[in-house]
Amino acid sequence: MKRTPLYETHRKLKGKLVEFGGWEMPLFYHGVVSEHKAVRENAGLFDICHMGRLSVKGPDAGPFLQGVTVNNVDMLVPGKAQYSLVCNPQGGVKDDIFIYKKGDTDFFICVNASNREKIYQWFLNQKGKFIVEIRDISDQVGMIALQGPKAPRVLEKILGKRFKSLKHAEFYEEEISGVPAMIARTGYTGERGYEFYFPVQFSENLWNLFYETGQDEQLVPVGLGARDTLRLEMGYALYGHELTEEISPLEADLARFVYFGKENFIGKEALSAQNKKGVSRILVGFELKFKNVPRQHCKVFHDDHEIGEVTSGNLTPSVQKGIGMALIQSDFNKPGDEILIGVRDKKIPALIRDKNFYKKK
């Protein structure tokens, strides 16, 4: 298994290390529930160095990315980031990514850890006649996330006020305690937060700086367990669960990120056909009527008829109910309708609902 530059830090903090996407990563430090609540109420610090990072540069960088992703790259201006998806010709999702436009010919891409090599090779294979340089810079660039309502207070003690002008999905470059860094207002928790990209050799320095500065704001280190419950409460997709090469963006209820107005992109023909005809299955949110724990691959029923399966599920700290997402036959996609979730040989009643389970007070 691979280890991030912060592996020894996780050991010192007594993190429970597990395998994730080929990496040895902390599942939790003091507990999933306490870490989850810290991010919702105060602040949390995440090691996300396991994510993949690609550089796409050159005169044709923009047109190239416009062709290999489904969103509208042409809408980006320098300093703006965009959520997008990379699809195969059949319309299935190869990965969901974030594209950061640093300049007209300079883009930075963040991909999922388990898809790093796949997307890098896919981009190289699609290069063709485009004048573009594609590099995997994951081993040269570190990545840390600071998330939670008190994250701005922590960052202000380090940087002053400039970062406060950032809107969602915006970024800029600035030195953090002498370390050149890219500071982005992005995240995977639903809370106010920031992600930082910097030369990998400074990973421990910056982690320690954030960690020590954040103690007055009750900041805690956060593992993968709470990262998952936080994203689930917001209805955010996780690759390998809500997204796979066999699930399209339209089926995953992400049609809003597919721009059909551009001339062409990989998967457009298949997705256009789906868009015209309608999808036969769709991703929905559900809430169990009792405090059972739904899990991925649990079967979903309407009466005695199997209509799909759970993609993600859990009993989460902020919602305190069994919630999840499921890919089901689209005929049964009506908020408020009752379905049944197969949990440990029992069929537990649940209601279909929107996927944004956690509403801020």
Image: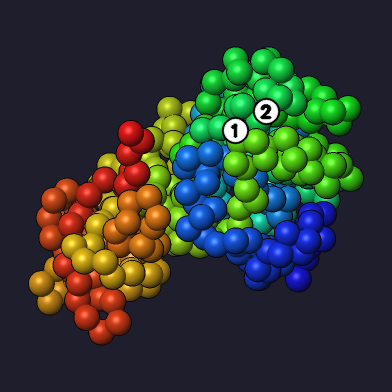
**The C terminus appears in which quarter of the rendering?**
top left
Residue at (24, 70) in percent of width and height: 341
**The N terminus appears in which quarter of the rendering?**
bottom right
Task: Name which quarter of the figure residue 161 lies in.
Answer: top right
Give the crowd class for mark 1: few <14, some 14-19, many >=20 residues within 10 Å. many
The reply to whether residue 267 is visible in this rendering is no
Residue of label 2: 155
Pinpoint residue 54: horizontal percent, then vertical percent. Answer: 74, 43
Amino acid on which the number 2 mark rests in the picture: Leu
Are the residues flagged by discs 2 and 1 in contact, CB closer than 8 Å?
yes
Foreground residue among 231 and 13: 13
**Drawn side of residue 242 relative to residue 20, left or right:** left
Residue at (75, 40) in percent of width and height: 212
Pinpoint residue 106: horizontal percent, then vertical percent. Answer: 75, 27
The circle on residue 279 is none
Task: Name which quarter of the figure residue 272 lies in.
Answer: top left
Pinpoint residue 125: horizontal percent, then vertical percent. Answer: 71, 51
Q: Residue furthest front?
A: 216
Give the crowd class for mark 2: few <14, some 14-19, many >=20 residues within 10 Å. many
Q: How is the image coloured?
A: rainbow
**Drawn side of residue 113 relative to residue 201, left or right:** left
Residue at (85, 42) in percent of width and height: 205
Amino acid on which the number 1 mark rests in the picture: Ala
Q: CA distance from mark 2 to mark 1?
A: 6 Å
The circle on residue 151 is 1
The reply to whether residue 182 is visible in this rendering is yes
Dot 1: element: helix
Foreground residue among 355 and 134: 355
Up-down: is 339 above or below 133? below
